[in-house]
Image (cartoon, rainbow, N blue to C red):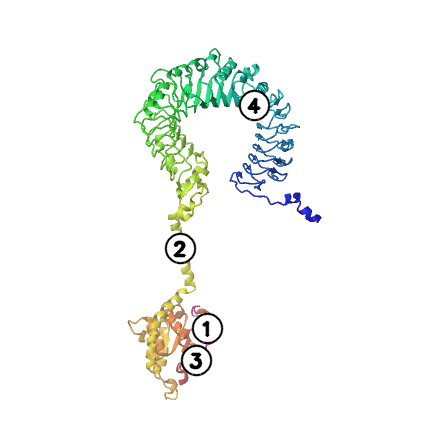
């Protein structure tokens, strides 16, 4: 029972549970395991460099969940509902540089979590329900920390020493909207301090002294300060800017603020004489009507840049003109009013911007008509302007904007992207100083000489262009993404081009020839096109571009994906491996034919050596004569077999041995001879021989002649000699006679072997295997060289030929 209890206890089950696994890791060892519903840390390859576990349901991290991940550099656990972390959970993460624990349920922070993370550079602890940072200081071991984000809705106190160990930061973010207690100097020891973001909604409303103390601690001349989630409703709300802070502040950003007319006036008064360089207001709600002239006596000469973005005016119809703000507008050189529903800036207001060099009115409601008013037509206004941005407005006439900006003799940059332009006139006036032009996101279908030849950077992305042949001699950068180009434009039109971006078009392929026309091209971005992965294109990308052929693919080879052929669709071009058959057809055919010819020759030699041709020839001859044999068989059935026998023997011999046959064999066997007693015995009766020179029918196929001769002869005599073995004609004759005799149509007794000279069976070709066997098993006659032995030879031959007749 105790054993069962221990086995099924919670602790035992905890260590025996099966961990889930995550294999969503790319080639760079970045593992994206977010949004997978994991309830515990999954098993991931130990060589992972980045692990994203965000937006799962992991509520606890145990001491062994991350063991072995010594190479891990980035760990993201935000958005999990994480409530418990074992003190030694991160001890093995010696290489960790970024850790995100934001948006979880951590009610307290433990310094042991970070005690071994000496390499950590970025830490995010935002929006967890801890009310204080804890003791001892949790960040004491993080000597390399450069970006820190802390706080949340429950943080209510910050004590001196809470950030001990943090000596310098590039970014500091503190969400302290409900902070009630702050020790002055808590943030003051962090230096250098790069960028500070403070969310102080509550303190600005209820405890301006506390807010002022925090702002004073982080106010340095080179430190941009962002104040988030605040409401400036009157003079009381701007008091946190102490005299010391006002002397040090150079860059101030108000983010997500609601501000009244009174608060703006009070803010301008507070900032009177402050050496503020840049004032940024983002996500601002104006509750007033624009009556700010009460601050007209203030001094803001130091402000060089106003940046206003995402403005909501609650009562826009009552909002007044800004003509009374001459004291504020005459000094800045950079003004940005973005997404503020501006439909016109009166020419009188433009006149107030005496030092303006940079004007950004993007994402507003300007039209061609109101743009004329804004730029005061042809009136000499804004003559120091260098950069104009009218992108995201309802502009439709390119000729209008070109005519309006012609007067700006110092204009170098013009952004008129995301407008309604659809037609490009044949010619347009432009200032000779214009170098950068952005007309992306329009509806152009063709390019004309309207474009100025002085351009160094041209952006025509996201139009409907199919070709570009205009000569731009000094152009250095060209952006053509999101168009309908089927091929790269000719580089002859851009002799000085260094950067070409032509992503997301309809390019099928490009090659070395296409890029050779670009004399100075260094950077190319041509990914995300519908590439046909031909042999030439794949080879060019893999060997020329990826191999460092002088042009760098700055968008990475991973963005070059095959669209066809179908079996390669979706594969990265640099990973495609095409066969030799596809890429080198001529070479493959040549090599294949050569190899086939070599094999054929080799096979022929082998077949010749093993006499395969002879066997094939004999089989063919046998099949051809098979038909004739049936006819002969029918004739034999009708007639007496003896009546068909015309010869006593068919003689097979070499032509070189014809002298012996004609001078010895024929006279001895065919001419009548007498015995020594003077009488003719039966053994000396003349015999009839069949000789091919004499008895073969002219004009008949030789095989039929041989077959007829063998069938019409009682015996077959082979005159074997060295000549017989080497003679082609004789061998051919013997080939078929051998095939006929020894394949079942006659017995071995029908064959008589005569050796004119000593000849062993090894001298007989191996293909005559039955003849060789016959020489081994049958007695054969040898022609004697001595005269006295020849009488016995002839007697033995006659007896063999007559068989039972002797």
Relative to the observer, which residue lies in front, 727 or 296?
A: 296
Which element carries disc 1, helix, strand or loop?
Answer: helix
User: Is the C-beta separation of discs 2 and 4 under 8 Å?
Assistant: no
In the rendered image, residue 439 lying in the magenta stretch gets the answer: no
Nearest the viewer among 311 and 595 is: 311
Point out the tag, 1 or 2, that comes first from the N-terminus: 2
The residue that label 3 is drawn on is 789
Q: Which residues are magenta?
A: 767-778
Identify the disc placed on residue 596. 2
Measuring 45% from the left and 34% from the top, which residue is drawn there?
555
The reply to whether discs 3 and 4 touch (Cβ–Cβ < 8 Å) is: no
Q: Main secondary structure of the magenta part?
A: helix
**Disc 4 marks which residue?**
202
Residue extending farthest left? 699
Name the spot of residue 693 as percent of width and height, x first.
Answer: 32, 73
Q: Could you tell which of marks 3 and 4 lies nearer the N-terminus?
A: 4
Q: Which residue is mark 1?
A: 773
Depicted 238 relative to depicted 58: above or below: above
If the image is split into quadrants, where does the C terminus sit? Answer: bottom left
């Amino acid at each position: 029972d105790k054993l069962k209890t221990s086995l099924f206890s919670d602790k035992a089950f905890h260590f025996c549970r099966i961990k889930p696994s995550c294999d969503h890791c790319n080639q760079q060892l970045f593992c994206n395991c977010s949004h997978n519903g994991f309830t515990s840390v999954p098993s991931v390859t130990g060589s992972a460099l980045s692990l994203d576990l965000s937006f799962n349901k992991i509520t606890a991290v145990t001491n062994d969940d991350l063991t072995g991940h010594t190479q891990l550099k980035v760990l993201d656990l935000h958005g999990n509902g994480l409530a418990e972390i074992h003190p030694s959970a991160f001890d093995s993460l010696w290489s960790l540089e970024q850790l995100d624990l934001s948006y979880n349920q951590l009610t307290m922070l433990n310094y042991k979590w970070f005690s071994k993370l000496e390499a950590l550079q970025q830490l995010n602890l935002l929006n967890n329900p801890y009310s204080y940072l804890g003791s001892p200081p949790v960040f004491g071991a993080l000597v390399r920390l450069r970006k820190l984000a802390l706080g949340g809705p429950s943080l209510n106190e910050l004590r001196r020493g809470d950030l001990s160990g943090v000596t310098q930061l590039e970014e500091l973010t503190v969400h302290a909207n409900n902070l009630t207690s702050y020790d002055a100097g808590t943030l003051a020891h962090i230096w250098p301090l790069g960028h500070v973001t403070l969310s102080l909604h509550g303190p600005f409303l209820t405890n301006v002294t506390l807010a002022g103390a925090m702002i004073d601690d982080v106010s340095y001349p080179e430190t941009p300060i962002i104040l988030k989630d605040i409401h400036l409703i009157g003079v009381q709300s701007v008091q946190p800017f102490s005299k010391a802070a006002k002397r040090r502040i150079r860059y101030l950003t108000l983010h997500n603020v609601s501000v009244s007319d009174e608060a703006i006036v009070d803010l301008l008064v507070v900032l009177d004489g402050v050496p503020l360089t840049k004032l940024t207001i983002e996500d601002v709600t104006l509750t007033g009507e624009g009556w700010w002239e009460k601050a007209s006596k203030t001094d803001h000469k130091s402000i060089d840049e106003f940046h206003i973005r995402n403005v909501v005016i609650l009562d826009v119809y009552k909002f007044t003109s800004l003509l009374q703000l001459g004291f504020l507008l005459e000094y800045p050189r950079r003004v940005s009013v973005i997404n503020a529903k501006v439909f016109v800036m009166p020419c009188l207001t433009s006149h107030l911007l005496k030092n303006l060099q940079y004007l950004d009115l993007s994402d507003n409601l300007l039209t061609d008509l109101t743009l004329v008013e804004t730029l005061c037509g042809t009136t000499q206004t804004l003559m120091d302007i260098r950069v104009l941005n009218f992108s995201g407005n309802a502009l439709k006439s390119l000729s209008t904007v070109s005519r309006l900006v012609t007067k700006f003799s110092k204009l170098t940059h013009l952004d008129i992207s995301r407008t309604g332009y659809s037609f490009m006139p044949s010619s347009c006036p432009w200032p000779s100083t214009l170098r950068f032009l952005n007309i992306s996101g329009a509806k152009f279908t063709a390019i004309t000489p309207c474009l100025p030849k002085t351009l160094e950077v041209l952006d025509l992305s996201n139009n409907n262009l199919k070709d570009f042949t205009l000569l731009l001699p000094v152009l250095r950068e060209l952006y053509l993404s999101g168009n309908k180009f089927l091929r790269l434009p000719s580089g002859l039109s851009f002799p000085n081009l260094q950067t070409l971006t032509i992503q997301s078009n309809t390019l099928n392929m490009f090659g070395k020839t296409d890029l050779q026309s670009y004399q100075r091209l260094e950077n190319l971005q041509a990914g995300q096109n519908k590439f046909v992965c031909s042999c030439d294109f794949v080879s060019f990308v893999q060997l020329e571009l990826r191999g460092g052929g002088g042009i760098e693919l700055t968008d990475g080879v991973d963005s070059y994906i095959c669209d066809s052929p179908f079996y390669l669709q979706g594969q990265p071009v640099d990973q495609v491996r095409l066969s030799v058959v596809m890429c080198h057809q001529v070479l493959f055919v040549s090599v294949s034919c050569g190899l086939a010819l070599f094999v054929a020759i080799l096979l022929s030699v082998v077949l010749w050596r093993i006499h395969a041709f002879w066997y094939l020839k004999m089989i063919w001859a046998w099949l051809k004569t098979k038909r004739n044999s049936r006819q002969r068989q029918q004739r034999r059935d009708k007639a007496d077999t003896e009546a068909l026998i015309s010869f006593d023997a068919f003689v097979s011999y070499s032509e070189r041995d014809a002298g012996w046959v004609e001078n010895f064999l024929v006279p001895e066997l065919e001419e009548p001879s007498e015995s020594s007693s003077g009488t003719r015995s039966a053994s000396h009766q003349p015999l009839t021989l069949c000789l091919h020179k004499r008895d073969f029918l002219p004009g008949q196929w030789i095989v039929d002649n041989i077959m007829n001769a063998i069938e019409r002869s009682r015996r077959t005599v082979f005159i074997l000699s060295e000549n017989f073995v080497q003679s082609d004609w004789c061998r051919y004759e013997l080939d078929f006679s051998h095939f006929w005799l020894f394949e079942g149509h006659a017995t071995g007794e029908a064959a008589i072997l005569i050796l004119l000279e000593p000849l062993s069976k090894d001298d007989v070709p191996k293909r005559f295997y039955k003849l060789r066997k016959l020489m081994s098993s049958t007695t054969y006659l040898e022609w004697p060289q001595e005269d006295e032995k020849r009488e016995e030879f002839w007697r033995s031959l006659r007896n063999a030929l007559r068989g039972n007749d002797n």
